[in-house]
Image: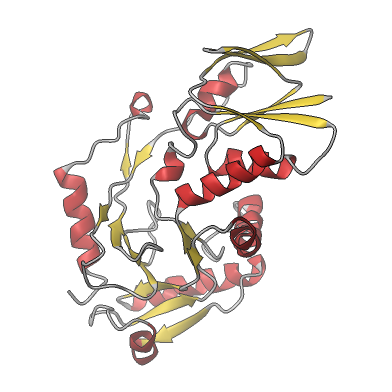
Amino acid sequence: MLKIAIIGAGIVGSSIARVLSKYEGLQAHLIEKEVDVGWGTSKSNTGIIHPGHEENPEKHPLRARLCSEGNRLWHLWAEELDIPVKWPGELMVAFDEEDFKEFQKYMEWSEKNGVPGIKIVYKDELNDLESNISPNAQGALWAPTAGQMSPWEAVIGLVENAVDNGVILHLETEVKGVRVREGEVKGLETNKGFIEANIIINASGLFADKISCMVGIDYFTIHPRKGEYYLFDESAFPKVTRILHPTPTPISKGVYVITTVENSLMIGPSAQDLQREMKEDRSTTHEGLSFVWNEAKKLVKE
């Protein structure tokens, strides 16, 4: 029997585990160092199912294709796994003529990536789509296929289904090394003993470079970037109907204003580059949260 070890039970590793669980003749192990699944970056993000129009098909062809395909796939998976999801659409907000010029690039990318419904809207239609939009907004790029989910709920749904189908889940299990003999993978050394495997899938997120180095693949490093958010009580307003964000810069897609699937206002994130050794820095800062607050104020009325 073919034995496969997937390192990392985040959204990527759990999705792979679920797909592999459909096949006979293999045994899949899903390995997670935290006490539960989805406790890495998968628990802490905006939870947006991106349409795919912001991915450059020339520079990143695989990412562009998978983003648009993934958007369509989540309609099916959310229904199959009873994952909370909604499809409010996304407004990339324009405040000046330069923003409108940038939209042409995203329109071209959307066509190449097969993303439907992308169009430029101006002030009147923008106000119809989002009543809480800032009066300074002059228009937006409308992407109707953008969705939202609870990312931790998605991971839980994927893993529960995978385990029901026979995947073996190992929690609080940290990979310490990869055993290779005569050019063949034999398995993983962990803090809980040896796990036999013929194939290893590295889905360890921020620590993917560390895992790769264990088998001599050291040509890349992951540089962490921290994002800080405000998540409000359900009673906080204004509640936006759509996903709102400014026109992206070369550094970031910008601060978002959303209403989560749990019906809470959320704004963020910041985007702070960290030193490589700071991958587990989960602190919040006055500077980061002040940046988020001031940027979000530009997008909504109050």
Up/down of 92 relative to 74, above or below: below
Residue closest to the eye, 238 or 248 = 238
Residue occupying image coordinates x 84% and y 37%:
24
Q: Position of residue 14 (x, y in %)?
A: 59, 41
Image quarter of the C terminus: bottom left
Q: Is residue 13 left or right of residue 1?
A: left
Colour setup of the view:
secondary structure
251 and 255: which one is in front? 255
> Where does residue 213 sit, x and y in percent of width and height?
57, 18
Work out which residue is located at the far top of the displayed protein and give it. 182
Q: Position of residue 190 (x, y in %)?
A: 56, 14
Q: Residue at x 67, y 43 (%)?
A: 18
Q: Quadrant of the N terminus?
A: top right
Q: Is residue 70 visible?
A: yes
Q: Nearer the viewer, residue 101 or 242?
A: 242
Quick one: 57 or 74, which is closer to the camera? 74
Residue at 61 percent of width and 57 percent of height: 64
Q: Splitting the image into 4 quarters, where does residue 167 fall?
A: top right
Q: Residue at x 45, y 28 (%)?
A: 34
- Left-right relation of 132 to 287: right
Image height of 109 relative to 171, above or below: below
